[in-house]
Amino acid sequence: MVTARFLLDRSVGGRLLVARLRDAGWDVRTLAELYGEHRSQTMKDEEWIGEGTRAGFVLLAKDHRVATRPLEAQAIYMHDARVIAFSRGDLTAAAMGDLCLEHERAIHRVASVAPPFVMSLSSQGLRRKHLNVPGRRG
């Protein structure tokens, strides 16, 4: 299995999720760890998508709608990003951790899937989302 490195969006689960994933052996970083607290809070989504992807991370986002918002979808497409996003934005850190660990093997496998993509993570597993990029299918 490919060892994936994950970068968590600022709104994903906080310290509890990071600790839980690290305890399970995941290589996880937060935006604040990489860029400092102030910059991490002021980065535009398209900026952290590009920088995180260039640094080799699979991106973990709270909101699967990132695939449909034009600026974010364009950034995912242009930077060949691999994004996993929770299917529901109201999940607690504990619920996010449960989902990640329940579907751990599938999540780590997507590190070898050709980008760009957004996968929505729910209790049923991963499902590929359509990227809202004009002139592109999938």
Image (tube, rainbow, N blue to C red):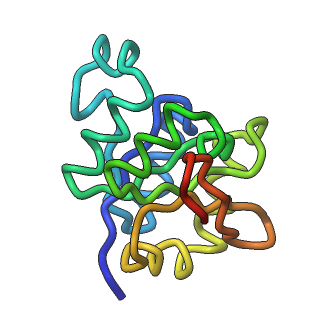
The answer to whether 6 appears left or right of 130 in the picture is left
Q: Percent x, y for residue 89?
A: 74, 37
Q: Nearer the viewer, residue 64 or 74?
A: 74
The answer to whether 116 appears left or right of 64 in the picture is left
Name the residue located 49 percent from the left edge and 55 percent from the top edge.
83
The answer to whether 52 appears left or right of 21 in the picture is left
> Where 8 sits versus 125, above or below?
above
Specify the quadrant of the image occupied by residue 115. bottom left
Q: Percent x, y for residue 58?
A: 38, 58
Name the residue located 72 percent from the left edge and 39 percent from the top edge.
92
Name the residue located 44 percent from the left edge and 29 percent from the top edge.
45
Q: Nearer the viewer, residue 17 or 55?
A: 55
Q: Percent x, y for residue 111?
A: 39, 73
Name the residue located 33 percent from the left edge and 29 percent from the top edge.
47
Label total for image: 0
> Where 65 sits versus 106, above or below?
above
Q: Percent x, y for residue 90?
A: 78, 36
> Where 79 sits versus 120, above or below?
above
In the rendered image, the quadrant that contains the N terminus is: bottom left
In the rendered image, the quadrant that contains the C terminus is: bottom right
Q: Would residue 37 be visible to someone looking at this image?
A: yes
Q: Residue furthest bottom?
A: 1
Q: Nearer the viewer, residue 45 or 27?
A: 45
Q: Would residue 98 be visible to someone looking at this image?
A: no
Q: Nearer the viewer, residue 53 or 40?
A: 53
